Image: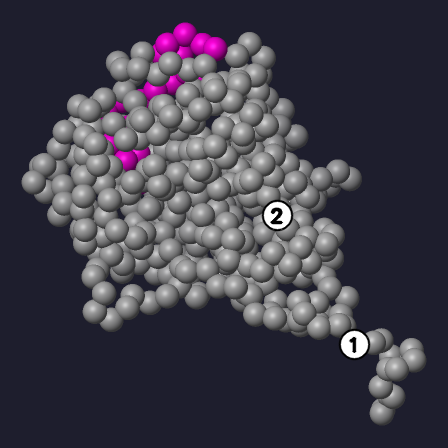
Amino acid sequence: MAATQRMAVGAVAAAACAASLAGCATGSNGTKEGTPAPRKGAPAPNSVLRLIGDGSTAYTGAQPHLPSPERLKPGQKPPQFVVFSWDGAGEDSQKLFSHFRKVSKENNATMTYFLSGVYLLPEEKRDLYRPPQHSPGSSDIGFNDEQGIADTLKQVRLAWLEGNEIGTHFNGHFCGPDGGVGEWSVKEWKSEIAQAKEFVKSWRTNAEMKKAAPLPFDYDKELIGARTPCLEGQKNFMKAARQLGFRYDSSGVNDQVWPKKKEGLWDVSMQLVPFPGHTYEQLTMDYNFMINQSGTQTQGDPDKFDYWGDQMRDGLLKGFYRAYDGNRAPLIIGNHFESWNGGTYMRAVDEVVKEVCNKSEVRCVSFHQLVDWLDAQDPQTLAKLRNLKVGEAPRQGWASFLSGRPAPAPKGVPGAPADKR
């Protein structure tokens, strides 16, 4: 990853750095509707600093800007959740991590950043990574340098302090046959997960950045979900993840219906949405749009860049409005910090965020916030919501559908009130 800016703070200043970042986050405009205001007299967010391990991470108190979930009241229409998530999140010369942090704050959104552990491991220490079914030091996405590590750490710190979630995209991103993640056993997945955690928890030692400020969270507690590389290996990953205390997985392909639990985890996979100009539907991920537009060429015909970006934007928006005006199923979107086809997909995501995240009854949230909300609901309410098909709104309206009372009889049948018109 390319280097752009060096972070150099004294060891004594580490606590002050963390505190100052918290202050910046508190003053952001990213507070979502329904987020509880700080209690009067309560300590400022992240006023506590307790280093963990070698000081790469630290406990700093409850995460700022993480709203408490509320259970739907009888008859209450559910909000429209939208999750924007990023695979292999890291900051390089494109500065897309910092860009989408800014977009989030400007549009009342929080997001999920699936951090790749090897982005915090320097190239010269690559042999510390021992991937399943591959030789030590192997990685299909490479490793990093000190500058790239520093830049990524800065964005991860700020993202968390602004209420975003830090998940994992694991490490070496091995896909396909010959040792790809789809062939890994439960035991091998546990090894990969443990190493992804360890690289986040020990970057200060591995990169010899002893004076850098810690990440302001305990990653063992922060990490509750993931998406597997190339959406492969989900079955054994979920078994390993459940045993390790994860709460969700986003590695499959779903229709736009309400989530349910699978293997004890919330299945919040990406979804199929309309693909403008085609009769089939498309997965809500930039890579999949690209493959169906320019094939494996990441930079196809420049004359089509704008059209391809519009296609993705319009497909995501069609999926959004199908849910917003229909069953209100959460819309799950996945992307990469890439400049494929001239960056047209990043422009598409920008435009979707700006159109949907400021609408009434819409909450653009992280997976962490979504599963907190799901866990807070009455299971019978969620079961009713799951009965609604793609784009299907309740025939008798939301108040009747979720009231817990029988729906009123339609006019013109025995027992119905007389029409007084």
What is the x, y in percent for residue 169?
Answer: 44, 30
Q: Considering the numbered disc 1 on the image, is that residue within a helix, a strand or a loop?
A: loop
Residue under the point 36% across and 12% down: 137
**Residue 290 position within the rendered picture, expressed as x and y whole percent measured from the top left:** 59, 31
Q: Could you tell me if residue 320 is visible in this image?
A: no
Q: On the rendered structure, is 350 left or right of 306?
A: left
Residue at numbered disc 1: 408
Which element type, helix, strand or loop, lies under badge 2?
loop
Q: Is residue 192 above or below residue 419?
A: above
- Where residue 112 sits in the image (x, y, percent)? 44, 43
In the image, residue 273 above or below residue 414: above
Q: Position of residue 240 (x, y in %)?
A: 49, 28
* Disc number for residue 259: 2
**Residue 421 higher or lower than 65, as above or below:** below
- The N terminus sits in image quarter: top left
The segment highlighted magenta reads 133-155
385 to the left or right of 63:
right
Whether 169 is drawn above or below 259: the answer is above
| Amino acid type assigned to the residue bearing label 2 in the image | Pro
Say if residue 379 shows up in the picture.
yes
Residue 157, by quadrant, is: top left
386 sits to left or right of 241? right
Give the numbered dot on residue 330.
none
Task: Check disc 1 and give the amino acid type.
Answer: Pro
